């Protein structure tokens, strides 16, 4: 099982693995937004939590189609499906690899980008915490979408259309958590709901992902 | 160890290809599938490997017995030969990769990236993967494609050793491997005659 | 008494819907016309909202059917997953565009209703927002169906998407309510005593609801028949190729 994770991490880090693209996209987005809405610090501070969350979500989306597409093209997916690892384990490890290579760098970069967007000081801790709690759900939901569209010719665009609506609850609670943290309001409700969505997604969605992967391999 | 197919029917993309196929294959024996292109060799092999359910009939096999090798070798271009093979060895419970490399004459290439291998060398690496799985039933789809004569002989030796060790193999190939243990099966007589033939309860029949 | 599962047989379904569809279609036309004409021309103006309130006769029934269509798709998908009746999967496929249109009507009438009341065409009110989200879910479901060639694979994948999507659509609805305080008026029809809506409004509203339900049913029957015919054509072509 660990072999699959280390292989995926190694592939992501080698040439052409696409590591860092999501991070670069996140940075560009954080630069473009102030250029678009103007440099007014109070305006930026007000929209910073939402922009940072939407940016993280879109950056996650960028690398989703790589989760299964490469393994599908070179036949590894067929071989993995006949291997002794249950397919549920495969999709969970794939989601974990996606989280480590794409989402974790975003979590670490978010406070730096928060400076660009004039994020209020009390919000930084909540920003990191909300992304740490929420991004695993993004990876797991994204893996489900990638499993649904594996092998389809126009899969990339369809993947976005399928996955983005599923991201809505995570986005709402995550951004709300940061906004409330910035204003010093109580945060326990969005915190609990965000953690609940992540826990539920991580626990249940791999079964759905494995089921659709089996259907697609047939 | 035994592979038993009972009254198998299978379809590709909703079109029934094979119907009414029954056979038994015992340990130490190999089966070579023959037939024109599109007659359902790949579909039958995928059905035996458990990647797709049969339209009708049953495949009897011990659980976790199949090692499947298809047209694509499942190699990662940026990983070296040894890394590729070590990964599959770890997935199948962590055997030593050195004997498999030696058997397929890949030892000298162990540190080369898979993207720099020739087509025949890639194929040999794909077949070396079978050796590290330690699984008794080999299901092989055109295993000798792009192999030269010497490599075909290497592969035939590997299959012979596998059969001698109590394994069995089902393969689709057009090359005569010179295996005395191999039985040849022409799939042409098992061609599905029309939709739903062979006891397949095809939905499309409901309209006809 | 005949079992409902008999209609899982495409031929039986075609046979029954042959005479059922025209009946349902005519009933839908008559009932909807009665409901809307009564609602638009024979009800008093609201003392606060004037005649604007009459858009309720389009808005509420379409919103109701937007949700019911999704629930119907969910049930049909479950039947497909559990019992593998092909008509069920095709009915779910046929319901999606009808549900999408109902959602669009609910959104547009909601915006038209909101304009004079809120002074703007669009407000991120939790109910309008959750209908917009539902619209996105319909789009994704239809897009997935249209991009898969093998009909059984399409049925399987969209069924799983429908199940997972239902959970997330529900979560999104709660998220939308959590996210902002409501500008919308409370539930238009209340089961509690001391109803907020007069019978003069309620009667035509109920009739419109029934009418919209019949329109939806007619659209689903028509769509399912089209899908069954498409499958039949495919089956005939396959047989042609094999002989």
Image (spheres, grey):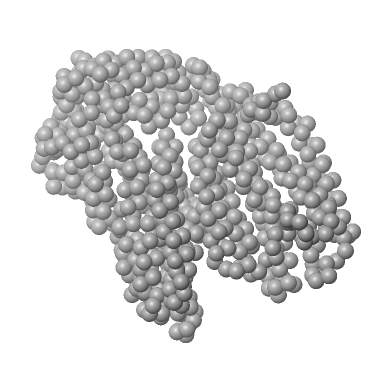
Residue at horizontal 55 percent and vertical 59 percent from the top: C174
Considering the image in quadrants, where does the C terminus of chain B appear?
top right
Residue at horizontal 24 percent and vertical 56 percent from the top: A14
- With respect to residue A124, does B161 lie above or below? above
- With respect to residue C212, does C119 lie above or below? below
One can see residue B117 in this view:
no
One can see residue B44 in this view:
yes
Query: Residue A149, position in %: x, y?
Result: 45, 46
Determine whether, in the image, residue C195 is placed left or right of residue B196: right
Viewer-closest of C33 and A10: C33
Query: Residue A215, position in %: x, y?
Result: 44, 37
Considering the image in quadrants, where does the N terminus of chain B appear?
top left
Query: Residue B132, position in %: x, y?
Result: 18, 34
Viewer-closest of C106 and B149: C106
Classify residue B36 by image quadrant.
top left
- With respect to residue A75, does A188 lie above or below? below
Toward the right, the furthest residue is C42
Viewer-closest of B148 and A65: A65
Toward the front, the furthest residue is C193
Residue at horizontal 23 percent and vertical 50 percent from the top: A6
Residue at horizontal 33 percent and vertical 60 percent from the top: A102
Query: Residue B79, position in %: x, y?
Result: 21, 49
- With respect to residue A202, does A194 lie above or below? below
């Amino acid at each position: 099982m660990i072999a699959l994770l280390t292989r995926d991490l190694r592939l992501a880090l080698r040439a052409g693995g696409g590591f860092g693209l999501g991070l670069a996209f996140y940075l560009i987005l954080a630069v473009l937004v102030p250029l678009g809405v103007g440099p007014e610090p109070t305006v930026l501070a007000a929209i910073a939590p939402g922009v940072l969350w939407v940016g993280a979500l879109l950056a996650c989306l960028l690398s989703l189609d790589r989760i299964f597409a490469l393994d599908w093209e070179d036949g590894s997916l067929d071989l993995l499906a006949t291997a002794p690892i249950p397919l549920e384990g495969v999709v969970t490890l794939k989601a974990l690899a996606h989280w480590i290579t794409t989402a974790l760098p975003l979590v670490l970069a978010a406070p730096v980008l928060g400076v660009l967007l004039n994020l209020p000081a009390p919000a930084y801790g909540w920003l990191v915490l909300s992304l740490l709690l929420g991004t695993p759900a993004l990876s797991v939901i994204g893996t489900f979408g990638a499993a649904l569209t594996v092998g389809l010719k126009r899969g990339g665009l369809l993947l976005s259309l399928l996955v983005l609506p599923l991201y809505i609850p995570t986005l709402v609670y995550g951004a709300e958590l940061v906004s409330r943290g910035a204003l010093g309001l109580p945060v326990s409700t969005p915190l609990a709901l965000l953690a609940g969505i992540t826990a539920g997604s991580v626990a249940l969605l791999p079964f759905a992902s494995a089921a659709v992967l089996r259907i697609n391999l047939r | 160890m035994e592979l038993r197919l009972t009254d198998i029917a299978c379809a590709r993309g909703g079109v029934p290809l094979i119907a009414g196929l029954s056979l038994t294959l015992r340990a130490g024996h190999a089966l070579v599938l023959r037939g024109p292109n599109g007659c359902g060799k790949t579909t039958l092999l995928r059905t035996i490997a458990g990647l797709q359910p049969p339209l009708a009939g049953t495949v009897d096999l011990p659980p976790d017995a199949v090692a499947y090798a298809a047209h694509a070798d499942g190699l990662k271009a940026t990983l070296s030969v040894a890394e590729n093979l070590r990964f599959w060895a770890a997935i199948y419970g962590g055997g030593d990769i050195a004997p498999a490399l030696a058997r397929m004459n890949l030892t000298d290439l162990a540190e080369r990236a898979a993207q720099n291998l020739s087509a025949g060398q890639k194929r040999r690496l794909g077949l070396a993967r079978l050796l590290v799985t330690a699984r008794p039933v080999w299901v092989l789809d055109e295993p000798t494609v792009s192999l030269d004569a010497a490599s075909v002989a290497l592969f035939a030796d590997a299959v012979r050793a596998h059969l001698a060790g109590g394994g069995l193999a089902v393969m689709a190939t057009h090359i005569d491997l010179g295996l005395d243990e191999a039985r040849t099966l022409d799939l042409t007589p098992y061609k599905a005659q029309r939709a739903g033939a062979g006891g397949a309860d095809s939905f499309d029949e409901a309209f006809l | 008494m005949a079992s409902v599962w008999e209609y899982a047989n495409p031929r039986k379904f075609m046979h029954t819907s042959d005479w059922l569809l025209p009946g349902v279609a005519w009933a839908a036309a008559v009932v909807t016309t009665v409901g809307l004409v009564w609602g638009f021309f024979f009800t008093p103006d609201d003392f606060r909202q004037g005649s604007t309130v009459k858009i309720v006769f389009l808005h509420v029934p379409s919103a109701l059917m937007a949700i019911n269509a999704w629930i119907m798709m969910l049930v049909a998908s479950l039947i497909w997953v559990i019992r593998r009746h092909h008509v069920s999967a095709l009915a779910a496929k046929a319901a999606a565009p009808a549900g999408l249109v109902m959602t669009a009507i609910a959104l547009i009438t909601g915006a038209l209703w909101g304009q004079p009341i809120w002074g703007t065409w669009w407000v991120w009110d939790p109910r309008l927002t959750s209908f917009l989200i539902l619209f996105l879910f319909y789009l994704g479901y239809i897009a997935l169906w249209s991009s898969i060639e093998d009909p059984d694979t399409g049925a399987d994948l969209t069924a799983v998407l429908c199940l997972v999507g239902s959970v997330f659509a529900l979560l999104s609805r709660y998220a939308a309510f959590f996210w902002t305080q409501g500008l919308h008026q409370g539930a238009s029809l209340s089961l509690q005593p001391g109803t907020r809506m007069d019978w003069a409004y309620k009667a035509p509203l109920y009739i419109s609801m029934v009418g919209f339900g019949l329109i939806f049913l007619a659209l689903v029957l028509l769509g399912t028949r089209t899908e069954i015919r498409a499958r039949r054509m495919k089956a005939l072509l396959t047989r042609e190729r094999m002989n």
